[in-house]
Image (cartoon, rainbow, N blue to C red):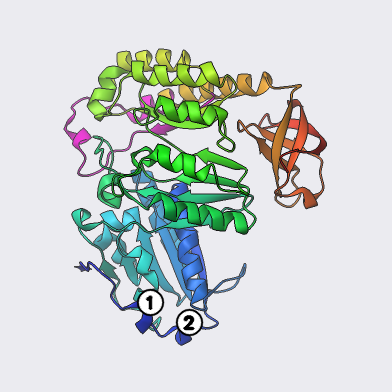
Amino acid sequence: MCNFVPEYKVKKDMIDTTIFQDKTAVYYTLGCKLNFSETSTIGKILQEAGIRTARKGEKADICVVNTCSVTEVADKKCRQAIHRLVKQHPGAFVVVTGCYAQLKPGQVADIEGVDVVLGAEQKKDLLSYLGDLEKHQKGEAFSSPTKDIRTFAPSCSRGDRTRFFLKVQDGCDYFCSYCTIPFARGRSRNGTVADIVAQAEQAASEGGREIVITGVNIGDFGKSTGETFFDLVKALDRVEGIKRYRISSIEPNLLTDEIIEYVSHSRSFMPHFHIPLQSGCDEVLKLMRRRYDTELFASKIRKIKEIMPDAFIGVDVIVGTRGETDEYFESAYDFINGLDVTQLHVFSYSERPGTQALKIDYVVTPEKKHERSQRLLALSEEKTRAFYAKHIGQTMEVLLEKPKPGAMMHGFTKNYIRVEVDGDHSLDNKLVQVKLGDFNEDSTALRGIILGMSDNE
């Protein structure tokens, strides 16, 4: 049964947190950086109520699963993760939230061991749905219809290493034909510039040096506050202590020339862009209901490279969408091959219930999807290697990160080249000058020699 509740089940000041003292929780996140940021915020809320994160191997009292639903495979991974956690933590109170929970709350609630399912509007209030942590005989689902998802829940979380992830926007108004995100996260909305700047200042006070700006459609920032993404960029650039910002993903039609030009001379915004293309064929872009064509996309790449020749540009591409004939794919491949970009993030099209793409007749076989994906991945590897190679011999600033046990110290240049160095762990989260050498053994990074601390440190 799915219960639709528009607001808090219990007011915050009515929650008896004494029952949470010495309780433990585990968190499992699937999907995008935005999900990881939100899970971290949920963890902080539970920690403030007295719930600590379970240690490795310890049986937890609470399991929180933040789900993704971008593809059918993602749905399957979510179900597998829930089953695995239920088995690993017998008797734990299991809460499931995220996109899969919003889109299919009843289906998720029927999974054995699940107690509560929370939709997009409810997850910020997760604490109030824990009750007395008594297991439910049957999972209960609480969610709001998509049209009622209006709240912007702020989130700024520290990643596993040096960088923070700052959520500035949520939801999407674009309704591309293949995508369920507007149904899972609601309409576009955001916090104020002032509130987001305050979060960045807090991150700086906690030792943050780098912030990744996240959201569903961040270029659409300002719709709910009468501001613009450019306003936000300029305000964040003035936050003392933050040395680097990276824009995680921005639609090409929303990446204005003024933003590109500002980044080129900015104090702290890195020459690093991630721009979704999805298809390099205009006919397919129309079928996808994207808001640009290949000429506009190419013009953005040219603009970036004209004023920032060494900029890293990552591009999202979907292969095998309905309507993508062999001719259309070859056209897309040729277009992408001709772009001066650094890396491709390749996804195979997955049919999602309720999307307009299902009305398109031509269906691409799984075999062709795989073949097309492999061709683009090979092209991506070629482009990335060429980009890295042209920087060999240069001296560049690197923000170092504490590695996993047994691994070398590593970090990233301003333009997102991964660099491995021999260095002391005391250099974690420090900016250093590094002479870039040749590729490492598996060609995933350049080897480097530390020359000294950066003047920016």
Sort mark 1 into few (<14), some (14-19) or many (20+) by Cα contacts within 10 Å: some
Q: Nearer the viewer, residue 6 or 85?
A: 6
Kind of residue at badge 1: Leu
Q: Is residue 192 magenta?
A: no
Q: Nearer the viewer, residue 298 or 244?
A: 244
- Decide if residue 358 is on the left or right side of residue 87: left
**Secondary structure of residue under mark 1:** loop
Q: Nearer the viewer, residue 6 or 371?
A: 6
Q: Which residue carries the number 1 mark?
A: 130
Stretch of the chain drawn in magenta? 342-371
**Secondary structure of residue under mark 2:** helix
Q: Is residue 103 above or below residue 316?
A: below
Placement of the N terminus among the 4 image quadrants: bottom left
Question: Which residue does the image show at 42% across and 12% down from the upper left?
Answer: 334
Image quadrant in which you'd find residue 216: top left
Q: Is residue 144 above or below residue 332?
A: below
Q: Are marks 2 and 1 in contact (CB under 8 Å)?
A: yes
Q: Nearer the viewer, residue 194 or 97?
A: 194
Image quadrant in which you'd find residue 93: bottom left
Question: Which residue does the image show at 57% across and 53% down from the upper left?
Answer: 159
Marker disc for residue 237: none
Sort mark 2 into few (<14), some (14-19) or many (20+) by Cα contacts within 10 Å: many
Image quadrant in which you'd find residue 205: bottom right
Q: Residue 437: give x, y in percent of width and height.
A: 77, 26
- Decide if residue 52 is on the left or right side of residue 14: right
Q: Is residue 415 above or below residue 52?
A: above
Q: Residue 227: give x, y in percent of width and height.
A: 34, 44
Placement of the C terminus among the 4 image quadrants: top right
Q: Which residue carries the number 2 mark?
A: 20
Question: Which residue does the image show at 35% across and 64% down from the upper left?
Answer: 123
Q: Is residue 356 magenta?
A: yes
Kind of residue at badge 2: Phe
